[in-house]
C-alpha cells in the first residue's frame, strides 16, 4: 500500500498470508516496465518525504523497495504478510505488540534482518530520545511507542510498548533502511555486524548525540538531489532495489533475486520517471516511453484534459481508470500561536477564537465553489471532515455532524458572529494556497468576494516557496487538498499529531483513543462519527469536495491491476508480465 504507517480501521481485516496468493514464478530476464510519476522524488529512503506532498511518491517507491508486515489487497483490506513475519498483541492494556521476523529474512545484499533493523524503524518513527529522524511516520501511533525491553543484535523480534491504545500498530514497523547501512555510512571501517551493534547500542542507551548523528544520516544520505553513486545506499527489503539514481528525474530498479519477504517479482527491471505534470507524462506515453502513469488534477491540467490527451493516442491501446481518491479539498484553520484564529492570539480566550472560526465558516461559499468548478473539474461535494462519500458511515455522519448549519454562505451571520467577538474590523487573514493552481485560484476568488462584509481582510500568502510558507506557520487559513483520514492507508491520528496546523482537542483525542481500542467495525465507525461531529463543533475547518484519482496504462503490461482508489501504478507488481511483440 502507498502510505507507510496508517490508521487502519477497515472492518474486513483479512488476516491471510501473502504466501498463499502469490507463488513465485521467477524473474524473466530482459523484461522491463517503465512507469511515470507526477512530481519529484527527494529520497530513496521511503520513510523520508523531503517535502510537503512528497509522501505519495515515497509510498510509490516503498511498494517496490520496502517490506511490510501488512499490505493492502485489491479491496483495500489488510492482508498479513507472513513471508516477512508476524505481529502479535502480547498485552492489551497496556498495549504491547511483538514484531517477529520470519526465519531467514534478509536484505537485498544478503545481510540478515534482525532486531537492530526493527529497533531502528521504531526509533525513526517514534523520534527516540526526542531526536527528529524526519520520518513520515512521526505523527502516527508511534508517537506513543517505545521499546518494552532492550533487544540484542541477532534477535529476530522486538516488543513495543504503547502508552495509549493505537489503531495503526499492525504496520507501524517498516523496513526502509538497514541498520548496517546507516552504521557504515557513519563509520566506513565497520563490518555489517559491528555497524548494526553501533546503531542498536545508541538506541538502547538513548544516546542523544549518537542518535542525532544516525538521524542525520537517515534523513540526508539517501537524498536524490545530486544523484546517488554509493551502492550500499541501494540495499532494500522489498522485491526491487534501486540500481541507479538520475537525480530527481528517474530511478532505475532491479528485481531482487530469490526474494522471499513478499510477493515475488517477475519483471527484471523497472524505471520510474518523474514528470512535472500529467500532460508531460501522457506525452511520454504517446511516444512509447512509459507503460503506465499516475496522474494529478493540478488545476493546470484537469482529469478531463488528461482524458482528452489519452484519447488522442492512436497507435497503442491505452486504458484510463478513475476512482474516488483519498484526498478532499478543504478549508482548514491554523491553530498555531501565530494564527489569528488561535486561542493564544485571542488572549487565551478559547470561546472568542471559536467564534471567529465559526464566523469564517459561515463565510465559505461551499455550494458556489463546487458548482463553479464542476463544469471543468471532476469534483463532488463532501459533507464530512472524516469520511469518504462512499464509506458506510458517511451518510449517517453527514446528517449529524453539524455541517448542515453551513449549507449556504451566510455573510450576515458571519458578520454578526464576528462583531460579537469585539475584534476590530477588518481582521487580516492570511490564506495559504497554491498560487499556480487555477482550481485553487478560483476557490480563492469566491472565498474573498464577500469577506470584507463579514469583517475579514483576506490576503494571499505570497511566497516563492509554497511549502516553506506552510512549514513556517505564518498563515491563518489553508486552502487545498488534505487526506480523508478514515480511508485505509491514511492516518486518522494526524488530526491531533500533525504539526501542519497544530490542532489539539481533548475530546477529539479521547475519541481517537476510543477508536484505537474499538474491537469491531460498529465501534470504530461510532468513534469516527463522533470525531467528525467534534471537529465541526470546534470549527476545525470546512470540507469542500473530493478529488478523484486516475491511472493510465497501456496493454504492453499484461496483468496490470488498478490499485484501490487508483492512486498507484507500483502496487500489484507481482501480477505483471510483458506482452510479447507480434
Image (cartoon, helix red, strand yellow):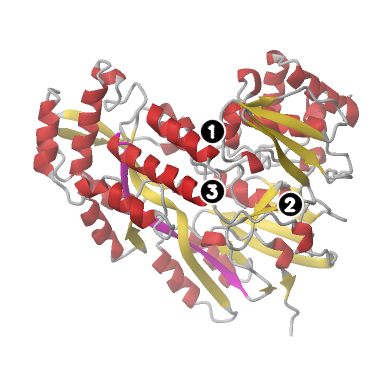
User: Label 1 belongs to which residue?
Assistant: 139
Q: Are marks 3 and 2 in contact (CB under 8 Å)?
A: no
Q: Position of residue 238 (x, y in %)?
A: 76, 49
Give the structural element (helix, strand or loop) at label 2. loop
Residue at image coords 73%, 63%: 574
Say which of 143 and 508 sits in front.
508
Indicate left or right for 454 with 361 as reference. left
Q: Is residue 148 above or below residue 553?
A: above
* Magenta span of residues: 538-554
Quarter the C terminus occupies: bottom right
From the image, tell me which residue sits under label 2: 81
Q: CA distance from mark 3 to mark 2?
A: 22 Å
* Image quadrant where residue 567 sits: bottom right
Res 216 quadrant in image: top right
Expressed as whole percent of the image width and height from the top left, the position of residue 239 reads 77, 53
> In the image shown, does 101 or 571 lie closer to the viewer?
101
Mark before the other along the chain sequence, 3 or 2:
2
Amino acid at each position: 500500500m502507498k502510505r507507510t504507517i496508517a490508521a487502519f480501521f477497515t472492518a474486513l481485516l483479512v488476516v491471510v498470508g501473502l504466501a498463499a496468493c502469490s507463488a513465485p514464478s521467477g524473474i524473466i530476464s530482459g523484461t522491463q516496465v517503465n512507469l511515470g510519476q507526477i512530481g519529484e522524488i527527494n529520497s530513496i529512503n521511503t520513510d523520508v518525504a523531503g517535502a510537503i506532498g512528497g509522501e505519495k511518491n515515497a509510498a510509490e517507491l516503498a511498494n517496490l523497495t520496502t517490506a511490510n508486515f501488512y499490505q493492502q489487497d485489491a479491496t483495500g483490506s489488510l492482508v498479513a504478510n507472513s513471508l516477512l513475519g508476524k505481529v502479535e498483541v502480547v498485552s492489551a492494556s497496556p498495549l504491547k505488540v511483538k514484531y517477529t521476523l520470519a526465519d531467514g529474512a534478509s536484505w537485498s545484499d544478503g545481510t540478515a534482518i534482525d532486531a537492530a533493523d526493527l529497533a531502528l524503524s521504531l526509533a525513526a518513527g517514534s523520534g527516540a530520545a526526542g531526536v527528529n529522524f524526519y520520518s513520515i511516520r512521526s505523527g502516527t501511533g508511534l508517537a506513543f511507542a517505545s521499546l518494552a525491553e532492550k533487544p540484542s543484535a541477532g534477535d529476530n523480534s522486538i516488543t513495543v510498548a504503547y502508552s495509549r491504545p493505537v489503531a495503526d500498530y499492525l504496520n507501524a514497523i517498516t523496513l526502509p533502511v538497514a541498520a548496517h547501512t546507516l552504521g557504515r555510512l557513519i563509520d566506513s571501517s565497520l563490518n555489517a555486524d559491528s555497524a548494526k551493534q553501533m546503531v542498536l547500542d545508541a538506541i538502547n542507551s538513548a544516546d542523544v548525540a549518537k542518535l542525532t548523528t544516525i538521524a542525520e544520516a537517515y534523513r540526508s544520505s539517501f537524498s536524490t538531489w545530486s544523484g546517488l553513486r554509493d551502492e550500499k545506499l541501494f540495499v532494500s527489503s522489498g522485491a526491487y532495489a534501486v540500481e541507479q539514481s538520475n537525480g530527481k528525474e528517474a530511478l532505475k530498479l532491479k528485481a531482487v533475486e530469490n526474494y522471499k519477504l513478499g510477493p515475488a517479482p517477475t519483471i527484471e527491471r523497472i524505471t520510474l520517471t518523474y514528470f512535472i505534470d500529467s500532460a508531460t507524462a501522457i506525452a511520454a506515453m504517446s511516444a512509447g516511453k512509459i507503460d503506465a502513469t499516475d496522474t494529478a488534477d493540478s488545476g493546470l491540467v484537469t482529469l478531463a484534459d488528461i482524458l482528452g490527451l489519452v484519447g488522442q493516442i492512436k497507435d497503442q491501446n491505452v486504458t484510463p481508470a478513475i476512482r474516488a481518491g483519498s484526498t478532499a479539498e478543504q478549508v482548514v484553520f491554523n491553530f498555531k500561536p501565530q494564527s489569528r484564529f488561535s486561542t493564544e492570539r485571542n488572549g487565551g480566550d478559547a470561546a472568542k477564537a471559536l467564534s471567529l472560526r465559526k464566523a469564517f465558516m459561515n463565510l465559505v461559499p461551499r455550494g458556489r465553489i463546487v458548482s463553479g468548478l464542476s463544469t471543468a473539474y471532476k469534483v463532488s461535494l463532501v459533507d464530512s471532515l472524516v469520511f469518504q462519500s462512499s464509506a458506510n458511515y458517511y451518510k449517517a455522519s453527514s446528517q449529524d455532524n453539524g455541517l448542515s448549519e453551513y449549507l449556504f454562505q451566510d455573510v450576515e451571520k458571519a458578520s454578526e458572529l464576528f462583531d460579537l467577538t469585539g475584534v476590530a474590523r477588518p481582521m487580516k487573514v492570511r490564506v495559504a494556497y497554491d498560487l499556480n493552481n487555477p482550481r485553487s485560484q478560483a476557490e480563492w476568488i469566491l472565498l474573498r468576494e464577500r469577506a470584507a462584509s463579514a469583517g475579514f481582510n483576506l490576503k494571499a500568502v505570497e511566497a516563492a516557496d509554497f511549502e516553506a510558507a506552510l512549514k513556517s506557520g505564518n498563515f491563518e487559513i489553508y486552502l487545498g487538498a488534505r487526506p480523508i483520514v478514515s480511508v485505509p492507508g491514511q492516518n486518522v491520528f494526524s488530526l491531533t499529531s500533525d504539526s501542519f496546523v497544530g490542532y489539539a482537542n481533548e475530546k477529539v483525542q479521547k475519541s481517537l483513543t476510543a477508536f484505537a481500542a474499538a474491537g469491531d467495525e460498529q465501534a470504530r465507525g461510532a468513534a469516527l462519527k463522533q470525531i467528525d461531529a467534534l471537529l465541526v463543533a470546534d470549527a476545525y475547518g470546512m470540507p469542500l469536495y473530493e478529488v478523484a484519482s486516475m491511472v493510465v496504462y497501456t496493454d504492453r503490461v499484461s496483468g496490470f491491476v488498478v490499485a484501490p482508489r487508483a492512486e498507484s501504478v507500483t502496487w500489484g507488481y507481482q501480477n505483471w508480465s510483458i506482452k510479447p511483440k507480434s
